[in-house]
Amino acid sequence: MNATTAVDTAADAEIATPADIQLGPLQQNIAFYLRRAQDAAFQAFARRVGEEDITPGHYALFAIIEANPGLNQAILGRAIGRDKSTLTPILADLERSGLVERRRSQRDRRANGVYLTPAGVDHLKTMQDHAQAHDRLLDDLVGPHHKAILLHLLERIADGLDEAAVDRIV
Amino acid sequence: MNATTAVDTAADAEIATPADIQLGPLQQNIAFYLRRAQDAAFQAFARRVGEEDITPGHYALFAIIEANPGLNQAILGRAIGRDKSTLTPILADLERSGLVERRRSQRDRRANGVYLTPAGVDHLKTMQDHAQAHDRLLDDLVGPHHKAILLHLLERIADGLDEAAVDRIV
DNA sequence: TATTGTTATACTCTATAACTATA
DNA sequence: TATAGTTATAGAGTATAACAATA
């Protein structure tokens, strides 16, 4: 599928087309392909949603809040892999927009329980429509049989590379 | 493998642990897993290389320059998916550090051919050592048989989601 | 007219550290 | 002492637009 016909000597390198680029050792590098696929998926999603204030990160945040109403910000941050200080202004914005609500917990008065408002649920549905269309594209590319394998492998990578897991091995 | 035992009512959400977090629709979302895996791989690599000025993006850039000596900056930018104006200060830095050389092309005097210096090749080797160790970890997680499938699927995603490809379908 | 590379600029995302209020 | 959330701040990474040189 990938012809590797390029010569790319110094003399004719200037007329190389993307297809001619040699990847060298990168060609066997999982991390490199991971980055490329993630880049491509992100940009394709951005093109799809256009102007609207929707990103994969936003979608994930809303989906997790809906699936886990009342989580506090620290736990929410860990769930999406971001520091609590990263979350603060994001949630403040969303609350100002009326999409999210933070309620002081009764049992631990330091903690905010985070919830979607009805408007937030609506917004999540909009994002879900985009995400589903995007996912159909991805699913078609991957194929139904391979999707399960892909998700499984990606999960293994994510779980296997967290700090504790790596320390256990190395 | 994933127990889904959490209740996460508003009443006890505060004591949720990461394992209890419900993913909702995200659980079938390729893009979500892609982002997680890429995040984890990036951070594991960063932990491995520590202080040294090494990133996956840097490594990819060096590897591509070595495999395609003399490419001009615009093409190089496209090869790594970054704008030429993003590349300019990066290459200027690397040239100042003596790792990269830019030579004005004879045939097109607007263009710079980009090359690694001997020091740049050395530096690439250092990065390669790190990248290989990192890749062994990744390979172990994925397994030799599945690696080929994974690379193939990730490549399909990257290729299938570029702007032209998506326009063709949608 | 179009393209290469540079510059100025600005934006987004993120974390660290220091703080407060609670625990 | 430790944790939840906030704030101030800074850094990395990136792109857009305008430009000079060249094609």
Image (cartoon, coloured by chain):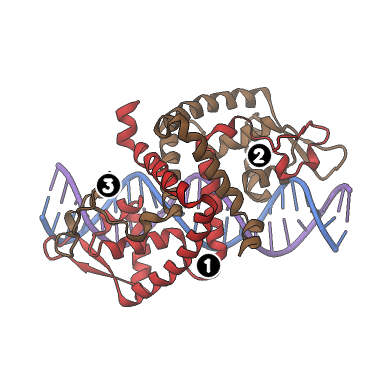
Chain colours: A red, B brown, C blue, D purple
- Disc 2 to disc 3, C-alpha distance: 45 Å
- Disc 2 to disc 1, C-alpha distance: 33 Å
Tag 2: amino acid: Leu
Q: Which residue is mark 1?
A: A49
SS label for mark 2: helix
Q: Is residue B120 above or below residue A135?
A: above
The image shows residue B129 at horizontal and vertical percentages of 51, 24
Tag 3: amino acid: Asn
Q: Which residue is mark 3?
A: B2
Q: Is residue B70 above or below residue B154?
A: above
Which quadrant of the figure has residue A12? top right
Left or right, B23 with reference to A56:
left
Q: Residues within 10 Å of mark 3 (few under 14, many from 20)?
A: few
Left or right, B62 with reference to A124:
right
The image shows residue A78 at horizontal and vertical percentages of 30, 51
Q: Residue at image x 59%, y 34%?
A: A27
Marks 1/3 in contact by CB < 8 Å: the verdict is no
SS label for mark 3: loop
Q: Nearer the viewer, mark 1 or mark 3?
A: 3
Q: Nearer the viewer, mark 2 or mark 3?
A: 3
Looking at the rendered structure, whether the residues under marks 2 and 1 are on a common chain is answered as no
Which quadrant of the figure has residue A24? top right
Q: Is residue A144 above or below residue A2?
A: below
For the residue pair B149 and A10, the one nearer the viewer reads as B149
Q: Residues within 10 Å of mark 2 (few under 14, many from 20)?
A: some
Q: Residue at image x 19%, y 67%?
A: A104
Q: Nearer the viewer, mark 2 or mark 1?
A: 1
Q: Is residue B127 above or below residue A114?
A: above
Q: Which residue is mark 2?
A: B91
